[in-house]
Structures are given as C-alpha cells and as structure tokens.
Image (cartoon, rainbow, N blue to C red):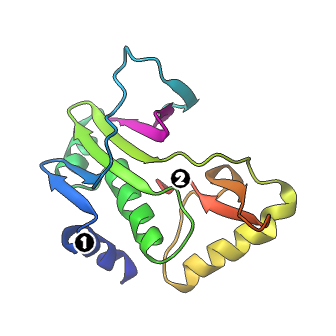
C-alpha cells in the first residue's frame, strides 16, 4: 500500500519536473557524467557503477537483453525504482541520500543522489541499523539489499551519530 502511494507522489508533487524518460528535482543543475569526463569512480560492479561528480553521486545501471528493455519501457528499471523509493523515504522523514535526478538512456539508467560524506557504519552501530529497518518494516516498506555498506554514518550539529541510507536499489 505504501509503495503504491510512492508512484503517485512523483506525479503529483511539484518538487520534480518530468520529461519523457527522466525526472529531475527542481533547482538541480547536474548532468550525468560523460564517459570521457574525469569523475571519481567510487564503486564498480557487474550490475552498476557509482561515480562522484560535482557533489552528487551518479549511479549507472547498464542494460542489456530483452527483459531489461521491457522493464525500462514499464518504468520498472532499478534506477527508477531506487529513485522512487528514496524519494518516498525522504517524504516520510527518513534520512536518505536525497534523489536528485533519474534518466533512462538506450544503454542504461542514471540515478543521481546527493553526496553524503561520512564513514561506513561499524559493528557497534548494527542496533541502530536494525532500528532503522524496523521503522521501515512497520510502515510496510522493505529493503531487499539491507546491509551496512548501504548506510553512511554522519554526526549532526549536536555531535550525535546519525545513519543515512545511501542505496535503495535492492
């Protein structure tokens, strides 16, 4: 039920401008890094690669095969779903890497989120991660790829440690 509301929130909210195969947060002036541009590659794998480019984290999901092309046409690709989930969690008041843009191309999808500096959580913060996930589950939201590497730890103005979700594509 909550996930159905998230698909409507992108159609009715004025925070984003939609166009064709993309959604962009108003006042976001970033563009997807081109292959020849020098961008800091943060993480790379067979299903996605993440780059830091101008204070934004850009994640690229390559696409190949008929199933992925069909998912793209139905707006069910991993980039679009992560974009919707992060925005929905942001609306609910969870600390997340704010989604800035999503764009589908012929060879894959780009997802831009705000760059959150911080450190990976340590084992001592596992109870806080469990509490974060419990809050999600009480609202009927699940993360299929819940692991400490998808969170970042930062300190707020009072010096207290806070967790932020940076990856919701699972």
What type of secondary structure mainly makes up the magenta span? Answer: strand
Q: Quadrant of residue 164?
A: bottom right
Q: Which residue is mark 2?
A: 167
Disc nearer the start of the sequence (1/2): 1
For image coordinates 31% across by 41% down, the residue present is 29
Q: Is residue 43 magenta?
A: no
Chain part drawn in magenta: 47-63
The residue drawn where x is 36% and y is 48% is: 79
Q: Is residue 74 visible?
A: no
Residue 56 lies in the magenta stretch:
yes
Q: Secondary structure at mark 2?
A: loop
Rendered location of residue 35, percent (x, y): 37, 19
Quadrant location of residue 41?
Answer: top right
| Residue placed furthest toward the front | 157
Front disc: 1 or 2: 1
Q: Is residue 29 above or below residue 167?
A: above
Residue at the extreme top of the image, as rendered: 36
């Amino acid at each position: 039920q909550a996930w159905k509301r998230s698909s409507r929130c992108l159609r009715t909210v004025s925070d984003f401008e939609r166009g064709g195969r993309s959604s962009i947060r108003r006042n976001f002036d970033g563009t997807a890094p081109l292959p020849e541009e020098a961008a800091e590659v943060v993480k790379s794998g067979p299903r996605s690669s993440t780059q830091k480019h101008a204070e934004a984290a850009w994640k690229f999901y390559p696409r190949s095969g008929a199933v992925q092309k069909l998912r793209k046409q139905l707006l069910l690709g991993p980039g679009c779903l992560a974009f919707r989930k992060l925005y929905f969690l942001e609306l609910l008041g969870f600390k997340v890497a704010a989604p800035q843009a999503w764009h589908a191309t012929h060879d894959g999808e780009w997802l831009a989120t705000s760059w959150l500096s911080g450190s990976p959580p340590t084992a001592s913060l596992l109870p806080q991660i469990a509490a974060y996930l419990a809050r999600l589950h009480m609202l009927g939201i699940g993360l299929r790829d819940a692991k400490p590497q998808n969170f970042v730890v930062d300190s707020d103005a009072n010096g207290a440690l806070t967790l932020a979700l940076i990856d919701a594509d699972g």
